Image: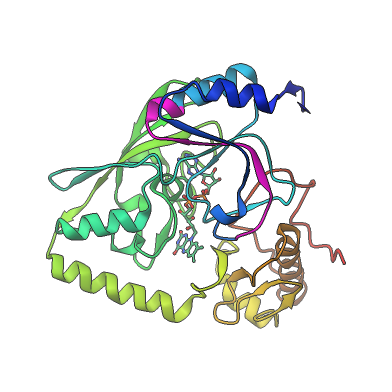
């Protein structure tokens, strides 16, 4: 198979990658069940690294052979194309795990789910990570996106991050170098970087009060978000001076449904898959919502969800593709 100036042979790739220790490699692997959106096609090659070294070796081979490489954390913020993902998909969660503690500092593997870190911190009487308990991503994906909720965000707790850089070497950045701002980080503008591990600095606090806060936040989330549905969380970024959910409600799109996808009736900011929707059906909801909000409110909504795999040009255009 020839891909944009590179030759990718799936069997050759599988044989070569299978030689790497601590790496699990699958061929033609369905991605839909691994994503929170529950849609989309297979990965030619899907690999789970159990050590930073195995991830680095895989990345080195992909770059040397010029094979397309896609990185996923826990796939809670992505929409995978129906045609799937060509080349190699490196999925870091849950395999690239591990949490160690040194005083109030936690060192966490990129693939560790956020809820596991919140639970670990609470158990060790460390506060500052309660906000992340209900976000269904991995540490790596949360740093990439600068995930946040309620009064917390990754920018407040991350102090140092190790990653595979564009050169293929393992590097690290600290403090302000993370360049965190709203759903933005050093990594989100450098698609050639792969987060391996991070250090979080938390604060000693009463375990009981931490658990109380986590329970309160979980209840707030449960009451306001369609957690029982397939979705990728907030579909759109918060436009300056507005709330996406309110704009979508005001444009009459709350509860809007087309085929097997739609806008949640519980939270207009969430686009949901009612079960069995194609990625194309889901993308069409994004387009319909963007068009309605632009026509009714004059605001252009920018997607927060990331597209993965083979998509047409300008996929989020506002056309009505019946
Ligand atoms: C029900 C629900 C509620 C949500 N609530 C919130 C919320 O309150 N706040 C919030 O901010 N988000 C929320 N989200 C969105 C999502 O969970 C977060 O953005 C999360 O941080 C994504 O992490 P992930 O591991 O799933 O990343 P993925 O979806 O796997 O990937 C997202 C992006 O990060 C990149 N990436 C992932 N891991 C790495 C890595 N190790 N190195 C380099 N790049 C990487 C991917 O290439 C991709 O571009 C919610 C989602 C759902 C489904």
Q: How is the image coloured?
A: rainbow
Q: Position of residue 212 (x, y in %)?
A: 22, 74
Q: What count of labels does the image hold?
A: 0
Q: Position of residue 108 (x, y in %)?
A: 30, 42
309 relative to 54 in the view: left or right: right
Q: Quadrant of the N terminus?
A: top right
Say whether residue 233 is magenta.
no
Q: Residue at x 76, y 52 (%)?
A: 315
Q: Quadrant of residue 291?
A: bottom right
Q: Quadrant of residue 253?
A: bottom right
Q: Quadrant of residue 43?
A: top right
Q: Residue at x 48, y 39 (%)?
A: 187
Between 156 and 312, the one lying in front of the other is 312
Q: Position of residue 45 (x, y in %)?
A: 61, 35
Between 289 and 136, the one lying in front of the other is 136
Furthest residue toward right: 322
Q: Position of residue 287 (x, y in %)?
A: 75, 64
Between 214 and 150, the one lying in front of the other is 214
Between 316 and 47, the one lying in front of the other is 47
Q: Quadrant of the C terminus?
A: bottom right
Say whether residue 53 is magenta.
yes
Report if residue 21 is visible in the image: yes
Q: Residue at x 78, y 73 (%)?
A: 295
Q: Which region of the structure is painted magenta?
A: 38-55
Q: Residue at x 32, y 40 (%)?
A: 198
Note whether 79 is above or below 66 in the view shown: below
């Amino acid at each position: 198979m020839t891909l944009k100036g590179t030759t990718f042979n799936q069997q050759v790739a599988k044989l070569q990658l299978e030689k790497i220790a601590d790496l699990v490699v699958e061929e033609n692997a369905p991605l839909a069940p691994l994503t929170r959106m529950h849609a989309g096609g297979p990965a030619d090659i899907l690999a789970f690294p159990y050590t930073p070294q195995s991830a680095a070796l895989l990345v080195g081979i992909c770059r040397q052979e010029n094979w397309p490489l896609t990185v996923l954390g826990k796939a809670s913020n992505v929409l995978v194309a129906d045609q799937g993902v060509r080349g190699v998909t490196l999925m870091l969660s849950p395999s690239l795990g591990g949490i160690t503690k040194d005083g109030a500092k936690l060192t966490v593997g990129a693939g560790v789910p956020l809820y596991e870190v919140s639970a670990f911190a609470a158990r060790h009487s460390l506060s500052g990570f309660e906000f992340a308990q209900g976000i269904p991503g991995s540490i790596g994906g949360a740093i990439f996106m600068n995930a946040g909720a309620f009064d917390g965000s990754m920018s407040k707790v991350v102090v140092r991050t190790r990653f595979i850089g564009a050169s293929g070497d393992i590097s690290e950045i600290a403090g302000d170098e993370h360049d965190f701002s709203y759903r933005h980080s050093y990594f989100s503008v450098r698609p050639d970087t792969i987060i391996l591990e991070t250090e979080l600095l938390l604060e000693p606090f009463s375990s009981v009060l931490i658990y109380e806060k986590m329970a309160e936040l979980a209840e707030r989330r449960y009451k306001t978000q369609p957690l029982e549905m397939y979705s990728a969380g907030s579909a759109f970024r918060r436009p300056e001076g507005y709330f996406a959910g309110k704009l979508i409600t005001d444009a009459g799109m709350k509860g809007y449904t087309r085929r097997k996808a739609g806008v949640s009736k519980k939270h207009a900011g969430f686009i949901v898959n009612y079960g069995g929707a194609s990625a194309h059906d889901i993308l069409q909801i994004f387009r319909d919502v963007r068009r309605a909000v632009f026509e009714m409110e004059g605001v252009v909504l920018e997607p927060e969800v990331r597209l993965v795999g083979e998509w047409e040009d300008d996929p989020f255009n506002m056309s009505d593709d019946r």
